[in-house]
Amino acid sequence: MTFNTAIFYDIENLLKGYGFSQNLISNLSLKEILEEIKETKQIGKIAVQRAYANWSDPRLGFLKNEILELGIDPIQVFGFMQGPRKNAADIQLAIDAMEMACQKESLENFVIISGDGGFASLAKKLHEYGKTVVGCAYETATNKVLASVCDAFVWIEDPEEDFTPKTNYSQTFRETTNNKSNTEMLTNDPRVVKMTQSIKPSFVSEKSAVLEKVCEVLDWFRNNRETKTELIERGIPLSVVKEGITYAIAGFDAAKIGFPKFVEFMQFVCSGTDLATFDVKGTGAKLAFRKLNKIGTQLPDLTDREIHSVEFYRSLLAKEQPVFKLPDFESVRKVAVYLEKNPVRSELIGETIEKFSNLLQGNVEQEAVKFSLLCFLAAECFERIPEDALLSEQKLTLKEEFLTAEKIISKLTFGMKEKIKNRLGEVKENIFYELINF
């Protein structure tokens, strides 16, 4: 395999502008994005990697070490988001890509990590030079034209997807009681529209009540003639099932009752029933009758035993606020010890991550430093000033009551336990001990 691939990162697009949130800082990982691109087998060996941003902005400190670790060339672009030069990075990226296409014949694959529609023209021009173009971006923020002209497109998980404010269905139902257009407002899927004629929405939040209502929804899909046929022959997309559940339960959010992903929630709900979830190649996850495993790979059931596991605890902690995206816990302890010796005083989060990564280099991996500090932040070990500003713009100071590594770790583990307990109802101490000693 030859070095035939060039990768271009539109950092502004990944950050959704420079007013980025805590969720983006906590969950954005260039390393994970690169791994997802490699898994597609659409590229060869990487010859060039460039990331375009205003790297002089101290708020980007949380990305700098990852850029260096991956061997990405940071391309400095001034004037980001300022008046007429707000597209300066896009223009520079396009110029560099075309220059390489013309001058470096060995480069055959061009990866554009951005959802901006303007890059559709770049992709078409690269095709004229006989190049393969792979796009990569958040599905919810990608121009359709760009996606269609690329030879392949890699959808990456939106770090903020699980934190998008949900529609206030409770308010909607109150305002539209007995209004025939109510179901049309909430769904466009004909199956769910039909379901709404038989099932009334409820306002429940307790886990047991939620599960009971979900069973009512699944019973409707089982018993309705059309949907029963689908469950037998080809399965029903989980997106449709989720739409039905969201209608039936106002403000439904699987993460609030302990399931970071909806598919995991369905694996739990279907456990021990005639229904199961399937991974169907090319179409995603579907719900179907358990015996009909020809449509795809049947996903395993999730029981209480599987939920109370290190892997599930780790997944739960990494989703929804407060976010605890844990590296290995030994690294967490080392960062806490260093924080005790070098307490943060009025620093931006980006500056802090960059400083600690440089000073702990060779002792703690750079990514582990970043996520350890973000875990301490989620555990409220820092004062954040001003309180109403975005995290990227706040000055952090280690609180007086957490000036020792022991107290920092104690505060972190307390916060983690509280989150697990609030979502699952209990914490298995032996599993939690294994988590922090993994």
Image: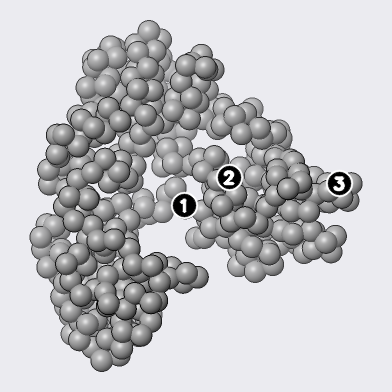
Which residue occupies the foreground of this view, 79 or 122? Answer: 122
- Camera-near label (3 vs 1) is 3
Amino acid identity at mark 3 = Lys
| Above or below: residue 45 compared with residue 409 | below
SS for callout 3: loop
Q: Circle 3 is placed at which residue position?
A: 104
- Residue depicted at x 23% and y 88%: 224
Residue 145 image offset from top left, x and y in percent: 65, 68
Q: Which mark is residue 34?
A: 2
Q: Is residue 9 above or below residue 438?
A: below
Mark 2: few/some/many CA within 10 Å (<14, 14-19, 20+): some
Q: Earlier in the sequence, mark 2 or mark 3?
A: 2
Could you tell me which residue is drawn at 25 percent across and 15 percent down? 406
Specify whether residue 152 is in view: yes
Q: Going 70% across and 40% down the picture, which residue do you hit?
A: 49
Mark pair 2, 3: CA separation: 22 Å
Amino acid type at circle 2 is: Leu
How crowded pointer 1 is (Cα within 10 Å; few <14, some 14-19, many 20+) is rated as some
